[in-house]
Image (spheres, rainbow, N blue to C red):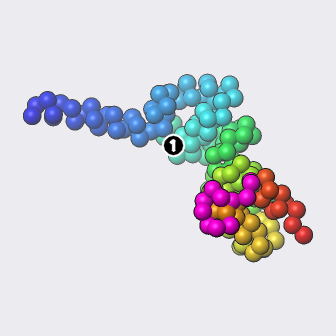
Amino acid sequence: MVKNLQMVPLLIAGFLMLSTPLFALGLSIDQLRQSADKGNPVAQYKLANSFFNGRGIVRNKTEALAWYMKAAENGYINAQYRLGVIYQTGNGAPKNYKKALSWYLKAAAMGYAGAQNNLGKMYEKGEGIEQNVVSPVIILRLTYGVHGQEGEGIPPEEATYLLLNQK
């Protein structure tokens, strides 16, 4: 019984460490920043998340936006999607549907289902682009395919081409 009680603080400490992304990576904020400064897009994204959510560091959405941008420009698909969300919702930067659309298109072209979904909703609502009910169908085909099975969609580059070259 005494042995089990002695384990409780260790279990709590372990849970707290694993619930923080930085600890899950085994990196301190300083180590994460060093890796991000060297151009590591995963570290840039994790650092952006830390700033955005205030985990392990003071919350700073301006700094988060800058790190998301670096990760996205380095081709990190999660950052591209996150920038789409930020610009679509205005949470972290002023609302800008054109920028949201641009980032969603990049992530959607790489097969990111969340970006494809949000892109379809933007077309359907006419947010940042002329309202179009055909475009969401193309995006749904990209994600779910003709028969409704995820992963059976048309190739991402074909869907992106169709979206950008509609008349």
Q: Quadrant of residue 18?
A: top left
Q: Position of residue 31 (x, y in %)?
A: 55, 24
- Which quadrant would the N terminus be assigned to in this image? top left
97 sits left or right of 23 in the view: right
Q: Which residues are magenta?
A: 146-156
* Residue 67 vs residue 148, the one in the foreground: 148
Magenta span includes 150: yes
Dominant secondary structure, magenta? loop
- Name the kind of residue labelled 1 in the image: Gly
* Outermost residue toward the left in this view: 1
Q: Position of residue 122 (x, y in %)?
A: 71, 67
The residue depicted at 81 percent of the width and 71 percent of the height is 130
Q: Report if residue 36 is visible in the image.
A: yes
Secondary structure category for the residue under label 1: loop
123 sits left or right of 45 in the view: right
* Residue 163 vs residue 8, the one in the foreground: 163
Q: Position of residue 79 (x, y in %)?
A: 65, 45
* Residue 48 vs residue 94, the one in the foreground: 48
44 sits left or right of 75 in the view: left
Q: Report if residue 102 is visible in the image.
A: no
Q: Position of residue 101 (x, y in %)?
A: 75, 58
Magenta span includes 55: no
The residue depicted at 65 percent of the width and 52 percent of the height is 112
* Outermost residue toward the right in this view: 167
Count the labels in the image.
1
* Residue 90 vs residue 35, the one in the foreground: 35
Residue indicated by mark 1: 54
The residue depicted at 73 percent of the width and 58 percent of the height is 154
